Image (cartoon, rainbow, N blue to C red):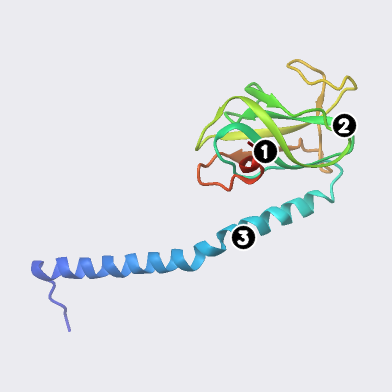
């Protein structure tokens, strides 16, 4: 049997399908959104747990806009710093700021003040450096990028999102 869809039946049919789609979206978001913070926190804990097994490690997560970047977790075999760069390309030419000197060991919630506002939708790169012995980091310094067990440089790219969990930055007064 053929269905006759004349012009007068298309609008009610389209509205009906639209209504069903909207209901499905509302139900889906109601069903999944309450778990989003718990899923985010579980993923963060798993990543940090994996990082704790490394000699050197660096972990960041999506953050809110502002002048401060928060580095979730750092592990250093030797003393060093975390430097912040704009993620425009893979070069380290767009320096924005650096952490305080970090002794060897584990560190959580390191704050770096950037020399510009970190804006919604932009990407940034945190880079872990091993100190050259002078306990200072500046442009042109001889500090080397820390490496992981595979010989890859330790960097972490993160996104700025106005809807992100403010984390430690939300506690700054």
**Dot 3: within a 10 Å radius of its alpha carbon, few (fewer than 14), some, or many (20 or more) residues?**
few
The numbered mark at residue 39 is 3
**Sequence-earlier tag: 3 or 1:** 3
On residue 79, the disc is 2
- Tell which of 112 and 60 is nearer to you: 112
Whole-number angstrom distance, CA of label 1 to CA of label 2: 19 Å
Asked if the residues shown at circle 3 and circle 2 are in contact, with their CB atoms under 8 angstroms apart, the answer is no
Q: Mark 2 or mark 1, which is nearer the start of the sequence?
A: 1
Q: How far apart are marks 3 and 2 (CA)?
A: 33 Å
Q: Viewer-nearest of labels 1 and 2?
A: 1
Q: Do the residues labelled 1 and 2 touch (CB within 8 Å)?
A: no
Q: Quadrant of residue 37?
A: bottom right
Label 2 crowd bin: few (<14), some (14–19), many (20+), radius 10 Å? some
Residue situated in front as seen by the camera: 105 or 86: 105
Q: In this view, does 64 lie above or below 24?
A: above
Residue most extreme to the top = 140
Quote the CA–CA distance across marks 3 and 1.
Answer: 20 Å
**Residue named by callout 1:** 70
- Which image quarter is the N terminus in? bottom left
Q: Where is residue 137 in the image (x, y as percent from the top left)?
A: 78, 21
Q: Which mark is residue 165?
A: none
Looking at the rendered image, the disc whose residue lies closer to the viewer, 3 or 1, is 1
Apparent side of residue 103 relative to residue 155 in the rendered image (left or right): right
Q: In this view, does 16 lie above or below 129?
A: below
Task: Name the residue nearer the viewer: 60 or 88.
Answer: 60
Q: Note whether 153 is above or below 36 in the view shown.
A: above
């Amino acid at each position: 049997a053929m269905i006759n869809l004349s012009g007068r039946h298309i609008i009610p049919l389209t509205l009906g399908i639209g209504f069903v789609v909207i209901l499905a979206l509302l139900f889906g978001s109601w069903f999944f959104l309450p778990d989003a913070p718990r899923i985010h926190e579980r993923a963060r804990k798993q990543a940090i747990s994996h990082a704790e097994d490394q000699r050197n490690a660096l972990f960041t997560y999506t953050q809110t806009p502002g002048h401060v970047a928060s580095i979730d977790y750092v592990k250093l075999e030797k003393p060093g710093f975390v430097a912040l760069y704009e993620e425009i390309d893979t070069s380290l030419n767009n320096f924005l700021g650096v952490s305080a000197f970090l002794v060897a060991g584990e560190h959580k919630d390191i704050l770096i003040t950037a020399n510009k506002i970190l804006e919604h939708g932009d990407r940034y790169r945190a880079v872990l450096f091993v100190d050259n012995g002078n306990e200072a980091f500046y442009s042109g310094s001889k500090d080397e990028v820390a490496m992981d067990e595979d010989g890859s440089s330790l960097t972490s790219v993160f996104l700025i999102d106005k809807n992100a969990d403010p984390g430690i930055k939300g506690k700054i007064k």
